[in-house]
Image (spheres, rainbow, N blue to C red):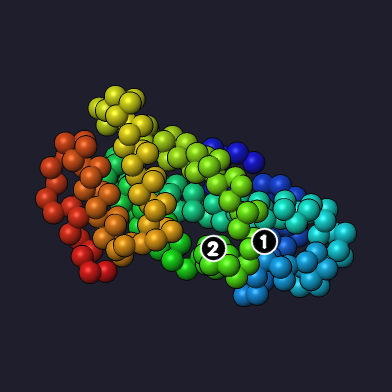
């Protein structure tokens, strides 16, 4: 699977009919009980398949962890894609909807909460498995966003576009990990910043969702 493909559930990209349910069950168990509680035998029991089927669908446990991350990344990129599709001629609005959608989804993301718990020592086995490819995943997400931003006639040079994209992606990621405002206010600020970079003087861009 490549990130540049249409974002869709990982079960439809690779594996058989049970890959999606197995990954979903692993995410649920991890969120409720921790990564150490996830075993191939337990996943087989939850999904109603043989243990060999679980191995056939997701491979080793580290491979399962990567599949879980890829599954959640697909969900986030689907939100981004939808935002840009709704605003094909208005980049600040597309940025606003994408940022707000991602941050709202992150706020109720069970896997993200499990990773946060791992960082506080409750599940030291999970964190390394989910962070070994962090830089690659960030780069892939940025590439996906860049492909959509560059489709707009922004009038920016390539280097300027790169700076804008890097700023947007890193800001959203920082708020996913440690939010300092509501999704609406953060999205308003990023939309306003994008408008100013484009010299689009729309009034009060960062104020639409103040307090929400």
In the rendered image, the vertical position of residue 116 relative to residue 194, given as above or below: below
Left or right of residue 200: residue 120: right
- Residue 133, position in %: x, y? 60, 45
- Residue 141, position in %: x, y? 49, 43
Disc 1 marks which residue? 125
Residue 191 vs residue 186, the one in the foreground: 186
**Residue found at x 39% / y 61%:** 178
Label 1 residue SS: loop
- Location of residue 33 (image quadrant): bottom right
Label at residue 77 = none
Nearest to N terminus: mark 2 or mark 1: 2
In the rendered image, the vertical position of residue 129 relative to residue 112, given as above or below: above
**Residue found at x 71% / y 68%:** 36
Disc 2 marks which residue? 119
Left or right of residue 78: residue 201: left
- Location of residue 207 (image quadrant): bottom left
Q: Residues within 10 Å of mark 2 (few under 14, many from 20)?
A: some
Residue 57 vs residue 136, the one in the foreground: 136
Left or right of residue 146: residue 136: right
Could you tell me how far apart the alpha carbons at marks 2 and 1 are, in whole angstroms? 10 Å
Residue 12 vs residue 121, the one in the foreground: 121
């Amino acid at each position: 699977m490549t990130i540049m493909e249409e974002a869709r559930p990982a079960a439809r990209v690779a594996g058989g009919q049970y890959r999606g349910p197995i990954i979903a069950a692993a995410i649920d168990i991890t969120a409720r009980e921790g990564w150490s509680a996830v075993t191939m035998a337990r996943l087989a029991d939850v999904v109603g398949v043989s243990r060999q089927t679980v191995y056939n669908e997701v491979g080793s446990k580290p491979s399962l962890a990567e599949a879980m991350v890829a599954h959640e990344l697909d969900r986030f990129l689907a939100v981004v894609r939808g935002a840009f599709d709704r605003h094909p001629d208005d980049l600040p609005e597309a940025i606003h909807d994408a940022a707000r959608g991602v941050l709202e989804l992150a706020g109720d993301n069970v896997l993200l909460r499990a990773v946060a718990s791992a960082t506080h020592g409750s599940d030291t086995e999970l964190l390394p498995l989910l962070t070994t490819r962090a830089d690659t995943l960030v780069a892939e997400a940025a590439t996906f966003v860049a492909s959509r931003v560059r489709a707009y006639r922004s009038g920016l040079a390539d280097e300027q576009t790169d700076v804008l994209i890097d700023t947007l992606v890193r800001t959203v990621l920082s708020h996913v990990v440690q939010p300092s405002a509501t999704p609406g206010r953060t999205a308003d600020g990023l939309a306003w910043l994008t408008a100013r970079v484009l010299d689009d003087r729309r009034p009060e861009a960062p104020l639409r969702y103040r307090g929400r």
